[in-house]
Image (cartoon, rainbow, N blue to C red):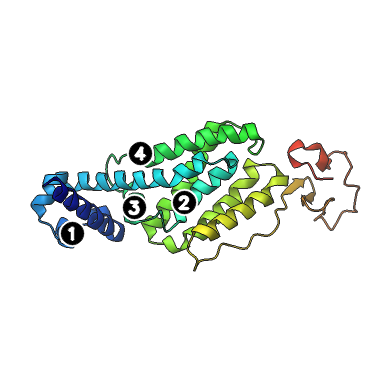
Amino acid sequence: MQKRAEITRTALLLAAAAVFTRVGYAHARLDTITTSAHVSKGALYDHFGSKANLARAVIDAGSARFQIARSPILTSRIPAFEALIRISCTLVDPAVNEASVRATFRLIPEIPDPPATLLATWLSDYRELARRAITEGDLRDEDPDAVAQLLVDTLAGVRLLAAATGRLDDLPVRLAATWVLLLPGLVDATKVDYFRELVTRQVAQVGDRGTPPPSLPPYAPQQSNGDETVSVDPHRQGVRRAAANHSPRSPQSTSSGHRDIRSNPRRKEPD
């Protein structure tokens, strides 16, 4: 009898996840869910009591799946900043994004008082990894809790928006583009290209094979110093001036408005 009840519960969760993902919480009908699960509406109420409780149970199932997926990354010996990237890439892994996970990201912004398990776990993991990444020298010496909050807010937002708009096919490209924009503010300029290439590889490995990640040119941050634009290429020394109406000056000039690019400790160029 207990096994039969578990089979019924599982069937309802799978059917509900598919319906919630397809039409959202507000438009999901219990008749559609029970018909898809081949069970009675009475069985649904016996197990979950209400549509809202059913949705919360789906979120709990999706959160558990996400926790299972990120556990091997946390227990591996890879550097912490790489773990931050790899955990985010589980969001585009078809093996992870089964029905309950897809439904979870659709439901979180749509139901009242959703369980916070997935986002809370994600934030806790990122806080610990951010602290380690600072110690390991990959993440700039910033507030690790603030960095973790920024990453979860941004990456979860990308995933939630893709779910809400039905644009999951674009998610690999969106995820890679998000990291491209975030990395210059998180790591030193000499490390940006390495981590951008890591993002590209990870997205290609776990993401939709039919949606290639964007081609990423070498990172060259720009600084504006008065009337000139300085382009810093970690593979090449020197500066490029954009002001055509001024005669070239030495890049080592420290006169007003023309700061020596090498004086910035965060923009150190390689030998």
Q: Earlier in the sequence, mark 4 or mark 2?
A: 2
The amino acid type found where label 3 is placed reads Arg
How far is mark 3 from mark 2, CA to CA? 16 Å
Q: Residue at x 21, y 47 (%)?
A: 54
Instruction: Kindly check if marks 4 and 3 are in contact, taking CB atoms under 8 A apart as contact.
Output: no
Up the image or down, 41 lies above or below 138; here it is below
The amino acid type found where label 4 is placed reads Thr
How far is mark 4 from mark 3, CA to CA? 15 Å
Q: Which residue is mark 4?
A: 117
Inspect this view and state whether residue 259 appears: no
The amino acid type found where label 2 is placed reads Thr
Q: Disc 3 on helix, strand or loop?
A: helix
Q: Earlier in the sequence, mark 2 or mark 1?
A: 1
Q: Position of residue 216 (x, y in %)?
A: 64, 59
In the depicted view, which residue is nearer to us: 170 or 228? 170
Q: Position of residue 104 (x, y in %)?
A: 33, 49
Q: Position of residue 153 (x, y in %)?
A: 47, 42
Q: How many marks?
A: 4
Instruction: Kindly check if marks 1 and 3 are in contact, taking CB atoms under 8 A apart as contact.
Output: no
Q: Disc 4 on helix, strand or loop?
A: helix
Left or right side of 163 for 2 = left
How far is mark 4 from mark 2, CA to CA? 17 Å
Q: Earlier in the sequence, mark 1 or mark 4?
A: 1
Which label sits on residue 106?
A: 3
Q: Disc 1 on helix, strand or loop?
A: helix
Q: Earlier in the sequence, mark 1 or mark 3?
A: 1
Which label sits on residue 90?
A: 2
Q: Which residue is mark 1?
A: 37
How far is mark 1 from mark 4, CA to CA? 26 Å
